[in-house]
Image (cartoon, grey):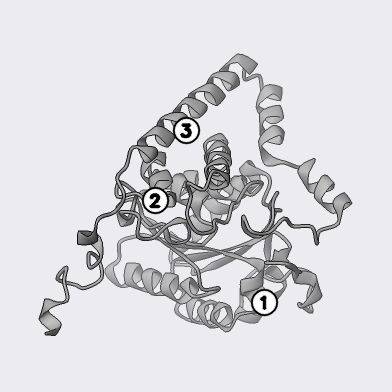
Amino acid sequence: MREMRLFEKRAYDLFMQNLVKGTSHLSLGQEAIAAGFGVAMRPGDYTFATYRGHAHTLARGVPMGPVLAELMGRANGLMAGKGGSMHLTSVEHGMMGSYAIIGAHLPIALGAAWSAAYRGTGQVAVCFFGDGTTNIGAFHEALNLAAVWKLPVVFVCENNHYMEYTPISAVTAVPRPAADRAAAYGLEPVVVDGNDADETHAAAVAALARARAGEGPTLIEAETYRHGGHSRADPGKYRPRDEVDAWLARDPLPAYRDRLLGLGVPAGRLDEIDAAVLAAVDLATEQAKAGAEPGAELVEKDVWADGGAAWRR
């Protein structure tokens, strides 16, 4: 969680310096969800995330340097600077993409789970999405087929209570946009405190075991809150100040530090972790800044199956 937090704070700083091109969507405040699942998943499992996917990418073991370089549009980026913040992908690490179209990745995660079941690999697809996705048709289509076919997929709604700038409660008839719809697909409603890494991890372990045992999908609603606006272009002033303050008081990182101290972990050990992570972020920053601007030879790379468009002519 500390790595995710300091990485995104650095990404914000670089954005303010005009070194991160385009927009970016930070998950500051939501780190416990990515961490809880990242630890529970096996190396061969699949992660599908939204454009708010930095933390999920790091959770699967992708190094910070290439991710930060990707945000900066450099040739040494994770995708040679062609994907940017909103499309992070590393098949090698099971990070099967960050998707900018709301709900688009749920049927794709469904297909990955079907493939795993067909091949008998024991892999599980885990699909993360925001509360606004629960009002998209793809959410219902994917849940229905996953339940009918009993596929090894876990759907995780990161309910931060806002779909861009609109409260989810203003446009949804039920108070829990994901969990209250689970029964429609024969699933049990599962709600967890998305700011509690241990609770999230326990839910992840149970859902992943269920999927591997052939018992079908799980729909988890993890309640959380983003500290900032929807994107770097959004100051988030539409949110009531008392609401923001209440959620900031439930920040998952200080809460987990207090829990570890209460369990007897020395404060010095936690300080060492903080220092090591900061040093790693500093190194990743320098690696990213040292990257070259992408050259023209990369324009057609990863666009056509054979690496070029010549076959079309």
Q: Residue at x 65, y 79 (%)?
A: 135
Specify which label sits upstream in the sequence, 1 or 3.
1
Instruction: Sort mark 1 into few (<14), some (14-19) or many (20+) by Cα contacts within 10 Å.
Output: few
Residue 271 spot, x, y in % from top left? 59, 20
Q: Which mark is residue 281?
A: 3
Q: Residue at x 77, y 78 (%)?
A: 171
| Identity of the residue furthest to the right in this view | 242
Viewer-closest of 128 and 90: 90
Residue 184 spot, x, y in % from top left? 65, 81
Q: Nearer the viewer, mark 2 or mark 1?
A: 2
Specify which label sits upstream in the sequence, 2 or 1.
2
Amino acid type of the residue tagged 2 in the rendering: Glu
Residue with the mark numbered 1: 183
Q: Secondary structure at mark 2?
A: helix
Q: Nearer the viewer, mark 1 or mark 3?
A: 3
Specify which label sits upstream in the sequence, 3 or 2.
2
Instruction: Sort mark 2 into few (<14), some (14-19) or many (20+) by Cα contacts within 10 Å.
Output: many
Residue 263 spot, x, y in % from top left? 67, 24
Residue with the mark numbered 2: 70
Q: Residue at x 50, y 59 (%)?
A: 22
237 versus 279 height, above or below: below
Amino acid type of the residue tagged 3 in the rendering: Val
Query: How many discs appear?
Result: 3
Q: Secondary structure at mark 3?
A: helix
Distance between the alpha carbons at the discs numbered 3 and 2: 14 Å
